[in-house]
Image (cartoon, rainbow, N blue to C red):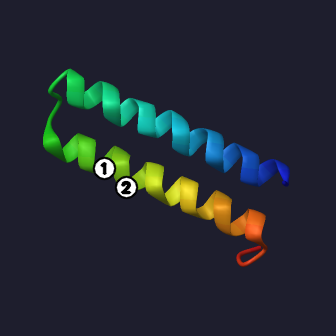
Amino acid sequence: MTGLSTILIVVGLFLAGGVYSFVKQEMPKGLIVLVSIASVMCLVAGVLRIQGIWE
């Protein structure tokens, strides 16, 4: 696992925790959607880098 892959996955998980927190605090739906999309993008990019598909 490369360093950038690790960073992307950690940031994605951090953002996923933020989504959970935002839902509990009843934040605006647009913000929740934006943060969840960013979380998914970070996680997918990290996994693709681990698999060697995207370098």
Residue located 45% across and 56% down the image: 40
Instruction: Indicate the amino acid at tag 2.
Output: Ile
Task: Count residues near mark 2 (Cα–Cα under 10 Å), then give few for <14, some for 14-19, many for 20+.
Answer: some
Q: Residue furthest top?
A: 25
Residue under pointer 1: 34
Q: Secondary structure at mark 2?
A: helix
Relative to 16, does residue 9 appear above or below in the rendering?
Answer: below
Query: Residue 38, percent across and down?
Result: 43, 52
Q: Quadrant of residue 49?
A: bottom right
Image mark count: 2
Query: Residue 32, percent across and down?
Result: 25, 42
Task: Count residues near mark 1 (Cα–Cα under 10 Å), then give few for <14, some for 14-19, many for 20+.
Answer: few
Task: From the viewer's perspective, tell me whether residue 12 is left or right of residue 47.
Answer: left
Q: Quadrant of residue 12?
A: top right
Q: Secondary structure at mark 1?
A: helix
- Callouts 2 and 1 close, C-beta under 8 Å: yes
Task: From the viewer's perspective, tell me whether residue 4 is left or right of residue 34.
Answer: right
Q: Residue furthest right?
A: 2
Residue under pointer 2: 37
Task: From the viewer's perspective, tell me whether residue 45 is left or right of residue 25.
Answer: right
Instruction: Indicate the amino acid at tag 1.
Output: Leu
Residue located 63% across and 39% down the image: 10
- Residue 4: assigned label: none
Task: From the viewer's perspective, tell me whether residue 11 is left or right of residue 53.
Answer: left
Q: Give the Cα distance between marks 2 and 1.
A: 5 Å
Q: Quadrant of the C terminus?
A: bottom right
Query: Residue 11, percent across and down?
Result: 58, 40
Q: Quadrant of the N terminus?
A: bottom right
Q: Residue furthest bottom?
A: 53
